[in-house]
Image (cartoon, grey):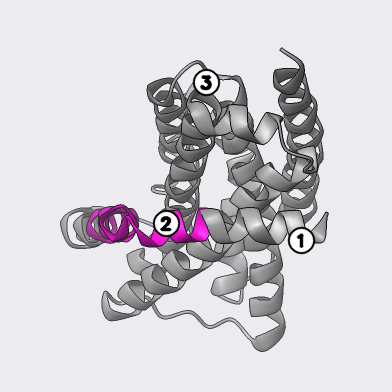
Amino acid sequence: MFNDIKTMFWRSWINTLRMPEAVAMSVAIPAILMLVFINVFGGSMDVGAYNYANFIVPGILVNVLVQSSSSTGIGVNEDMTKGIFLRFRSMDISSAAFLTGHVIAAFIKTILTTTVTIGVALLAGFRPTAGFGDWLVILGLVVLFIFAITWFSVWLGVVMPDASSVSGILALMAILVFLSPGMAPTENMPRFLRYFAENQPMAPFVNSLRALMNNHEITDNNLLLAILWWGGILVVMFVVTILAYRKRLTI
């Protein structure tokens, strides 16, 4: 099984390297968005004890992670709907290897784009005060989120009829970043929208990243909630994706 996963990983990674413009855009769009928010809205936004760059970077990072996962779902869907899937069905390979290879390649690409985004943020005025231990927790949260959102994207790639459907649903996921504490404080939102923004799965993740990056106390059990939300999503999406893929193998 390990050799199967390695082979599928290299196949996915080589396909990624053949589309450098897609990787560049996955970095450029969030970076441009961050610069626009900081320079256009930063001066008029009341974010309390934070400077606006420190406030918005966690939200931008979540946007990067969601956007990076979209290409993975599209790649899986194209494999599922084109002739290569028929060849995989006839080969003696693990049902998890094909999907896991895509996920590992996506993880490496996403880590690289996240690192570049943080570099751009530092140039734009981001000044984190996190300690070494805080950065380890941040890394753990980011890794958990990447795997959870990537397996969700892969599931879409398996079950959706075409790549445009995958892209559309993941675009809606990106909108959830804006309906969270990621881009602006929730205090001035209408009551129903504020309730949703503060209780959806991305909210504790964003709040935890922001507190850790700025060496603030994590309140309201946000860290625990983030781990429970995204750990649960990861487990569920891994299981349902493998089951959906095996079902496709028998059709």
Residue 88: x, y in percent? 65, 35
Name which residue lies at 77% across and 17% down.
250
Q: Residues within 10 Å of mark 3 (few under 14, many from 20)?
A: few
Name which residue lies at 19% across and 56% down.
36
* Marks 3/1: CA–CA distance: 50 Å
Residue 14: x, y in percent? 46, 60
* Marks 1/2: CA–CA distance: 20 Å
Q: Which mark is residue 120?
A: none
* Viewer-proximal residue among 19 and 33: 19
Name which residue lies at 38% across and 72% down.
116
Residue 182: x, y in percent? 46, 49
Residue interval drawn in magenta: 12-34
Would you say residue 191 sits in the magenta stretch? no
Mark 2 highlights which residue?
Answer: 16
Tag count in the figure? 3
- Quadrant for the N terminus, please: bottom right
Q: Report the mark closest to the observer, 1 or 2.
A: 1
Helix, strand or loop under label 1: helix
Name which residue lies at 39% across and 62% down.
17
Mark 3 highlights which residue?
Answer: 192
What's the amino acid at mark 1? Answer: Asn
- Most extreme residue toward the bottom, as rendered? 132
- Quadrant for the C terminus, please: top right
Mark 1 highlights which residue?
Answer: 3
Disc on the earlier residue, 3 or 2: 2
* Viewer-proximal residue among 161 and 234: 161
What's the amino acid at mark 2? Answer: Thr
What's the amino acid at mark 3? Answer: Phe
